[in-house]
Amino acid sequence: MNPKNSVGWILLLLFQCGPLTNAEKALELANSHLLPTGGHRKLINVHAEGYPRDCSEIFKQSEENSKDGLYVIQPAKEPIAVYCNMQDGGWTVIQHITANSTVDFDRTWQDYKYGFGSIDDNYWLGNEYMHQLTSSPTPYTLRIKLVDLNAEIKWGEYEPFHIESESSQYRIRLGLYRGSAIDALCQDTEAYLHDNQKFTTKDRDNDNYFQNCAKLEYNGIAGGGWWYDACAGANLNRKNVIYWQQDCNKTHMCKYAWMMVRPVDYHRDCSKVCPSQKDEL
Ligand SMILES: [Ca+2]
């Protein structure tokens, strides 16, 4: 490349990107490995003074006018970056998967602990941060959102929802269910009861099966980390087949899934923002 052109390119890049501001420099995120390229600039509230504990607070403070996107929250000591789903009402996204995406969900305990992927794409926020988020005095609701290949949306909510600490192997605690999807985490009490199960990964078997459920493959793809029983009535982390009983499976494929949380006391007027029935694929 012509050196003059190189200088031109560098100047152009500097002009476009500019130096990081003090706020961007000072911000140390515990999960900075989940930021996309140019991540600090994409954080909508990076210049705010202090960070809220979750997306619902941001949504409330903005009088329900904030947009979907990447935000900084602080559920415990350290700020973290997350994707906020504001159009559905101020939800903090803790998992998002697209069937057959390039993000690998066949990961170790450590990866599932601190999260992987990219918060503007497919990601797992991390069991440690799920524990922090759901350990407030106010209980949290878990919402599952599923979109099939015809763009039909199904959703389900567990209230309350709590992830215990690592010393309890990030055990999941689920309360009452409601939604248009089937109650796939609690319905089958024979071998697929996910409520109260510990988390299992390919390198840490806490499930109730004689083998490790996270290692069991379908078409060469392992199940990934999950709160397995022996093994699953639902698993949103197997990337070739998002599984949610009859709502998402190998004959009725789903394109997307999300897991997101919000405090249970966040009552809102459903006439303004409700779960919609169609989504763009
Ligand atoms: Ca086992």
Image (tube, rainbow, N blue to C red):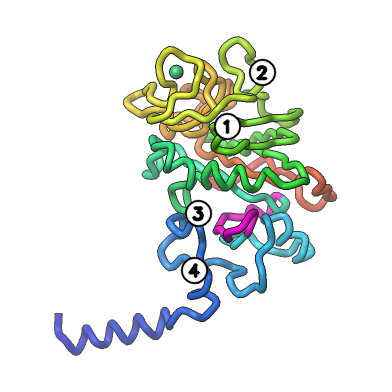
140 sits to left or right of 193: right
Quadrant of the image for the N terminus?
bottom left
Q: Which residue is mark 4?
A: 40
Q: Residue at x 34, y 84 (%)?
A: 12
The magenta region covers 74-88
Q: Contact (CB < 8 A) between labels 4 and 2?
A: no
- Helix, strand, or loop for circle 3? loop
Residue at the disc numbered 3: 119
1 or 4: tag closer to the N-terminus: 4
What's under tag 3, amino acid-wise? Ile
Q: Residue 97's spot in the image, x, y percent?
A: 49, 41
> Which of pointers 2 and 1 lies earlier in the amino acid sequence?
1
Q: Depth-wise, is mark 1 or mark 3 nearer the camera?
A: 1
- For the residues labelled 2 and 3, say whether their Cβ atoms are less than 8 Å apart: no
Give the residue at mark 1. Answer: 168
Q: What is the CA distance from the residue labelled 2 to the residue labelled 3?
A: 31 Å
**Circle 1 or circle 4, nearest the eye:** 1
Judged from the image, the secondary structure of the residue bearing numbered disc 4 is helix
| Residue matched to label 2 | 187
